[in-house]
Every structure is written in structure tokens, then in C-alpha cells.
Image (tube, rainbow, N blue to C red):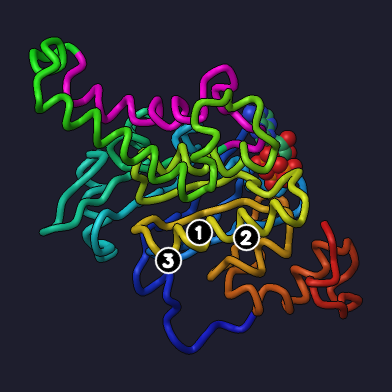
Amino acid sequence: MAAPLTARSWDKDSILAVDHLSMRFGGLIAVNDVSFRAGRGEVTAVIGPNGAGKTTVFNCITGFYKPSSGRLALFHGAAAAPRDVDAVTASGLAWGRQGESTLYLLERLPDHKVASWARVARTFQNIRLFSGMTVLENLLVAQHMSLASSGLLSPAALLNLPSWKVKQKAAVDLALYWLHKIGLAARADDSAGDLPYGDQRRLEVARAMCTRPVLLCLDEPAAGLNPRESAALNELLLSIRRDHATSILLIEHDMSVVMEISDHVVVLEYGCKIADGTPEEVRNDPRVIASYLGVDEEEAQAPLAEARP
Ligand SMILES: Nc1ncnc2c1ncn2[C@@H]1O[C@H](COP(=O)(O)OP(=O)(O)OP(=O)(O)O)[C@@H](O)[C@H]1O
């Protein structure tokens, strides 16, 4: 792919900078020296054939794996200049502040701090709702950490003082906001496990949003959805992009979802990045077409939109 002449939106204003990320499992290199940027307020899709390393990249970003090498810088506020990121890296610390902005080196944070400090939330390939809890309870439990940090055993909580009630009300209000947003307010008291599959998927996204993330990582959110459910999910993700200060990073096999909602697409194959650009650019990239169709680059004539992984 020819290098673009102008700086890309994701380079100019990044929320996440992945630099030379590698992950080895014994002799297997699942992710091999991958670098890319995710733009603030944008939807970035990571795509590639089965086994390309997408989930491993996600697991490194969300703290489930410690990378073998590489740097994962997440920015709250304006992205730090490269020399400032280097300075924090050299300091040995996991985070640093420049003016109003804070930079987190995710690979150095304990996994639970990736969620609570860096405010990175994720969903999984398989739905992991608390199926025996109600729909509303699933959204409240997501806010347990923020209530806990206010002190579950504090005098205010133990005595149920007004200040504690205000915090509890704010948690319920946020849950209700998301219930309305996903069209499930009428089912607030039903068991989450009784919802149709597409509703459970949207509830998972809403639950992640209740943690007020700056970066929302979605692992194949459209998997198993029918076209109507997939359209509802697209609408929800586009509304998050439009109305909230949350950037989205997603792994997705469904190319119609990727092409419709992404600003930026990163393509992996055998653990390496093979393309990085707008949906239109990667769709027409011969190497990407070859990877998806399993043909030589020269043979790859058809646009990716016609290919199905
Ligand atoms: N915990 C692990 N231990 C050993 N090998 C692993 C582990 N996790 C992933 N791998 C291997 O790393 C490679 C990349 O896997 P990964 O799941 O990241 O790919 P993927 O692109 O997400 O694939 P899919 O689209 O099928 O989910 C595969 O060869 C996989 O078998």
C-alpha cells in the first residue's frame, strides 16, 4: 500500500499507540512486531484470517496477557509527544502526566488497573453476562468498582448517608440511561439469560459502557447475529462514537460491519500487520484480498467486499 501523503486522523490524534508489539507462546510467534495507532473518537477495526493474532493483540491491550515485547501507550487527554512517551518508558513507571494529559503504559499495569485506571473495557467472543442476574443488575454490577472506590465500608455507606445515596442514584441513573439506549428498559427486571441473543450482545456493550471507558474493545461483537440484530448493533456503536467520548477498537469477521462503522482498519496475517488504512483502502489492497481469498497477490482482482472470510 502506498504511503499516504497527509497525516492520518489516527496518527494526528491517537488514543492508543501500539509499538513493536510481539507475543510468543513457546516457539509460536502469535504477534510479530505489530505497530499501529487507534484514533481518538474513532472506530478502529482489527481484521484478519483465523489465527492471525487479533485476539492476542486484544488480550495484550486489555491486560489479559503481558506482551513478550513492545509498548502499548494509552492517552487520557491529548496524545503525548513520542519523546514524552520515551521519557515515561525510560523512567520505569507505568504512567506519567504531562499537563492535563495522562499516559498509561498498559503492558506495565496490573491487569485490573488496565480497567480501573486506564479505563479500557472489553467484551468477549463468547457472551459473558451474569445470566442469572437481571438485566438492570448486570449494569449495576459493572459499576461496583467505582462504588467500591468510594468506600463500601465507609461511614457514609454503612450509615446510608445522603452522600452515599447520591452515588447509588448516579449508578442507577447511568444503568437506566444505557437500558433506554439499547431499547431494553421494559426488560430491566428479566433475567439477562432470557434475552434473545442480539439483545444480550447489546447488553454486554452497555455493561462495558457503564464503566465509562475511554477505550472500548469489542471481540467479534457481531458474531452469530442475524442481519436485523447486526444493524441494531451497528447503530449502537455509531451512537457511542457520536455521543460519547469513547473510542472503539473491534475485532470483527463480518466485513459488512467493518466497512460500515470503521474509520480505520488494521489487517493482520500470521501475526504480522499487512495493511493499515481506511476501509476503502484496505478493501482494495491486493495483499488483503489475497489473504482473504487465499490466492496469490497477482491473482487477487476481486474487491474484498465480495470476499467472505
Ligand atoms: N494462550 C495461548 N497459548 C498458545 N497459543 C496461543 C494462545 N493464544 C493464541 N495462541 C495461538 O496464537 C495464534 C493467534 O491466535 P489468535 O487467537 O490471536 O488469532 P485470531 O486472529 O484471534 O484468530 P480467530 O479469528 O480464529 O479468533 C494462533 O496460532 C493460536 O493458536
Label 1 residue SS = strand
Whether the magenta-drawn stretch holds residue 132 is answered as yes
Q: Which residue is mark 3?
A: 242
Q: Nearer the viewer, residue 157 or 7?
A: 157
Q: Which residue is mark 2?
A: 273
Q: Residue 90 at what x, y percent from top left?
A: 24, 47
Residue pictured at 58% horizontal, 73% vertical:
277
Q: Which residues are magenta?
A: 124-152
Q: Nearer the viewer, residue 266 or 305?
A: 305
Residue pictured at 48% horizontal, 89% vertical:
5
Q: Residue 157 at what x, y percent from top left?
A: 15, 16
- Sequence-earlier tag: 1 or 3: 1
The residues tagged by marks 1 and 3 sit, at their Cα atoms, a distance apart of: 27 Å
Cβ–Cβ under 8 Å for marks 2 and 1 = yes
The residues tagged by marks 2 and 1 sit, at their Cα atoms, a distance apart of: 8 Å
The residues tagged by marks 2 and 3 sit, at their Cα atoms, a distance apart of: 28 Å
